[in-house]
Image: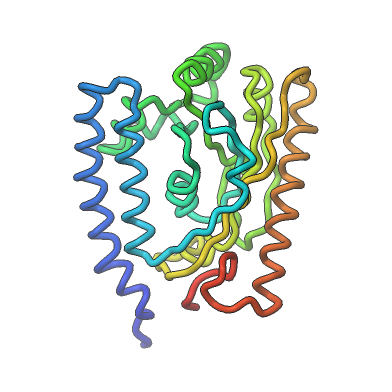
């Protein structure tokens, strides 16, 4: 019987215990900060520090491009492809915005994580009951200068191909009057492949594209908007993946991880 690979041992006996410590300590600080900062800005800084600690401990290096295309004083709906559970730490450390997510209401029950999401302004939605109340909450985020980050595929891609985008999130952006910003994450699936309890050091590319205006659109335009955003992201993923396949050296952004 063969022993697990080195990076399996590294993940189970080094990385997971450290991430647990990061989560407990910074989660407690985040919750405590809500006593003096109801806007959640201090909690967001805790989340960014938590993410940086995870990326540094794992050995993930991120090169972000295209940040000059967005205005840090505006609110957006950032839509990203989803390759790995590392995507959120990658995005929150790379995008200089007060980011909030839309998550399942069931996460409210999780200790530390659920409490953080609930009390720091993230949208915990019961999809069966989502409606005008959700739109009002998004409007509240806009007034506070926050932006949303969403994964419209709804699940992680196994092979890196960009899956079909769900229309509901784009309908929400249209109704809220928020520009949609396509963001491509390339290489994160090699850091922790779906279905495998193993992490690998590696380089990841993050590409921010021009915002897509929603002014003048109605609910019926959501499908076309979703397809347009998906097309932009998918073309970037294919292009960055092609660079890796054609001999870009290990450690270059988009090249992927350093272990098999």
Viewer-proximal residue among 172 and 61? 61
Quadrant into which the N terminus falls: bottom left
Q: Coloured how? A: rainbow
Up-down relation of residue 93 to residue 249 (above or below): above
The residue under the point 30% across, 32% down is: 42
Residue 128: % across, % down: 54, 22
The residue under the point 62% across, 46% down is: 208
Viewer-proximal residue among 60 and 21? 60
Viewer-proximal residue among 131 and 252? 252
Quadrant of residue 4 within the rendered picture: bottom left
The residue under the point 30% across, 74% down is: 9
Up-down relation of residue 6 to residue 29 (above or below): below
Residue 51: % across, % down: 37, 50
The residue under the point 67% across, 63% down is: 240
Residue 155 appears left or right of 106: right
Residue 183: % across, % down: 62, 45
Residue 213 appears left or right of 202: right
Count of numbered labels shown in the rendering: 0
Seen from this angle, which residue lies furthest front? 68
Up-down relation of residue 12 to residue 80 (above or below): below
Residue 257: % across, % down: 50, 71
């Amino acid at each position: 019987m063969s022993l697990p690979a080195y990076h399996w041992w590294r993940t189970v006996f080094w990385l997971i215990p450290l991430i647990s410590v990061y989560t407990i300590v910074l989660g407690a600080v985040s919750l405590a900060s809500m006593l003096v900062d109801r806007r959640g800005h201090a909690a967001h800084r805790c989340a960014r520090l938590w993410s940086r600690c995870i990326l540094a401990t794992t050995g993930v290096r991120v090169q972000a491009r295209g940040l000059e295309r967005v205005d840090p004083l505006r609110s957006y709906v950032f839509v990203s492809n989803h390759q790995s559970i590392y995507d959120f730490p990658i995005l929150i450390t790379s995008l200089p915005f007060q980011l909030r997510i839309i998550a399942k209401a069931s996460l409210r029950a999780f200790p530390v994580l659920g409490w953080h999401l609930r009390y720091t302004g993230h949208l915990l939605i019961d999809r069966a009951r989502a409606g005008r109340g959700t739109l009002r909450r998004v409007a509240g985020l806009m007034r506070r200068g926050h932006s949303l980050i969403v994964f419209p595929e709804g699940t992680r891609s196994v092979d890196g191909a960009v899956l079909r985008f769900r229309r509901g999130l784009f309908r929400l952006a249209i109704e809220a009057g928020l520009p949609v910003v396509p963001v491509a994450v390339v290489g994160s699936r090699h850091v922790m492949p779906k279905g495998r309890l193993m992490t690998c050091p590696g380089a990841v590319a993050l590409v921010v594209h021009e915002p897509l205006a929603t002014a003048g659109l109605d609910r019926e335009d959501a499908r076309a908007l979703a397809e347009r955003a998906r097309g932009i992201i998918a073309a970037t993923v294919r292009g960055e993946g092609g660079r890796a396949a054609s001999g870009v050296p290990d450690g270059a952004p988009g090249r992927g991880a350093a272990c098999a």
